[in-house]
Image (cartoon, coloured by chain):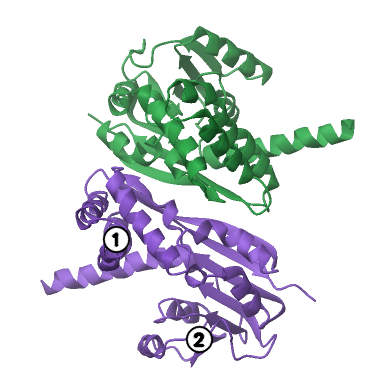
Chain colours: A purple, B green
């Protein structure tokens, strides 16, 4: 049992590695660079960011003290010394103009009612010529086999809940126009597809089951309370999503990663 | 004007090149290999296949004499001498078992009511250890910005028309399980995303406008006659799809390419 658990935890680490590589494999900052991570939450991306750029100085901010405490524990647990965690409102950030070299914003714009304006504001904190990296998912990019109306309806509930909260769960496809609207130049956006079939058992378990479907299942209470969907229909959709992780199923989801440059005035 | 047209035709050639590279860049067969292309249609893929494997012998079959005539003109126009075009029913192919080294099937299974059975039958024509390549699109992988219900409804009509004709326009996501069901081994499927934004003007015009949206627009008559959608709603959807090719729009579509091996008995 112990041996099994060891292998299991190695396997999960490998799986996390796959997704991390897909999203972050091409992001690293040079020695001495000052990087602002806006909206670090519990530090899930912070540790990857800091570990991949060991000689850069990462300033990670979030508005929630509770999240920052979790992020601090995670950063210390990873033995990273190049991260400063600080409480700040990313819509009104307490930094001087052009006081950072680079900006990193991951899974944050999806929650904001005015993402382009927020990004433009954050970009003023970056020196001209500095880079801006944006990563977002897009729940409308999720499709799967077997295909059922109930499964799609359950995903659609997530999109509606996010919209009701002022966000946009379909923001991935908008990353390019948002970055352009925010005034960035040389913008390049690339899709990062997580494609899952039976030949990729780590992703079947780690992504289809434990990331995406678990996320949908996790909003059951607000989904049903909101009246967006009857409980039985939502549950059927979640069951159908789990079904795509059984033999013969497939699952596809796309993240979008954008890289832009702060214009010289 | 003449200069402009020359540049325009270069540009369109470049664009075709981009998509060809995405789908076929990793397919080439060695000298002397006997390759069966099942369902060549008008030869759109045949010329790419033959040009990329100049020392392989390509046998391309289709059930339609009319399509074969178009394919013949295309192959001769490209000056290719390594293609044999032959009329055959791919569901009852007139070849000896194991008489080819490799099988290539592109945009064909989507039209068949029993794609796994058809693929299994075709695979008997390939020697053990030979390869099978399958390429299919998936209309359910299409999403775009701006997002509208009418645009999605127009795409859904295409899916329904294909289903009514016994096919499956969502087959891309099923390529892996279909190849396994057909008895192939070492199956690997990879998604090939065509992602389009304003920074990729060749794809805005060549893919969003002239490939995908033109394809949807092309089924207007059967779509409206079938009663699946009112004409005005379909037209609104097509307008909205063209809108995604205007400034600030984005478009995403995914093809799936599978590679498998014919098992040793």
Tell me what residue is drawn at x 35 percent, y 68 percent: A16
Question: Which quadrant does the N terminus of chain A fall into?
Answer: bottom left
Chain to which the residue tagged by mark 2 belongs? A
The spot of residue A42 in percent (x, y) is 39, 82
Other residues around mark 1 within 10 Å, as few (<14) / some (14–19) / many (≥20):
few
Q: Quadrant of the C terminus of chain A?
A: bottom right
For label 2, the SS is strand
Q: Nearer the viewer, mark 1 or mark 2?
A: 1
Query: Of the numbered discs in the image, which one, if any, rests on residue A61?
Result: 2
Q: Nearer the viewer, residue A12 or A138?
A: A138
In screen coordinates, is A109 left or right of A3? right
Q: Could you tell me which residue is drawn at 54 percent across and 49 percent down?
A: B144
Residue B254 visible (yes or no): no
SS for tag 1? Answer: loop
Q: Is residue A144 left or right of residue B190?
A: left
Image coordinates for residue B95, horizontal then vertical, percent: 36, 12
**Residue A2 in view in this figure:** yes
Quarter of the figure with residue A11: bottom left
Q: Which mark is residue A227?
A: 1
Q: Identify which residue, A88 or B111, lies in the foreground.
A: A88
Please tell me in which quadrant of the rendered image residue B140 appears: top left
Q: Nearer the viewer, residue B5 or B83?
A: B5
Say which chain tag 1 marks. A
Looking at the picture, does residue A204 appear above or below residue A184? above
């Amino acid at each position: 049992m112990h041996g099994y658990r060891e292998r299991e935890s190695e396997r999960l680490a490998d799986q996390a590695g796959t997704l991390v590589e897909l999203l972050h494999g091409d992001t690293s900052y040079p020695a001495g660079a000052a990087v602002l991570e806006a909206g670090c939450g519990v530090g899930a991306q912070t540790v990857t960011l800091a570990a991949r750029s060991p000689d850069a100085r990462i300033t990670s901010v979030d508005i929630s003290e509770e999240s920052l405490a979790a992020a601090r524990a995670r950063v210390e647990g990873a033995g990273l010394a190049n991260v400063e965690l600080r409480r700040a409102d990313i819509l009104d950030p307490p930094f001087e103009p052009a006081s950072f070299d680079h900006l990193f914003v991951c899974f944050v714009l999806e929650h904001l009612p005015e993402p382009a304006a927020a990004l433009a504001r954050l970009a003023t904190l970056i020196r001209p010529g500095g880079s801006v990296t944006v990563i977002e998912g897009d729940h409308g990019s999720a499709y799967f086999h077997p295909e059922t109306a109930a499964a799609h309806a359950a995903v659609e509930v997530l999109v509606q809940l996010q919209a009701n909260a002022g966000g946009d769960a379909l923001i991935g496809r908008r990353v390019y126009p948002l970055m352009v609207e925010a005034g960035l130049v040389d913008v390049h956006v690339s899709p990062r597809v997580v494609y899952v079939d039976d030949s990729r058992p780590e992703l079947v378990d780690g992504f289809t089951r434990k990331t995406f479907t678990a996320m949908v299942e996790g909003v059951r209470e607000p989904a049903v309370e909101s009246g967006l969907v009857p409980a039985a229909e939502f549950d059927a959709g979640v069951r159908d999503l789990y079904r795509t992780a059984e033999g013969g199923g497939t699952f596809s989801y796309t993240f979008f990663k954008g890289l832009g440059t702060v214009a010289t005035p």
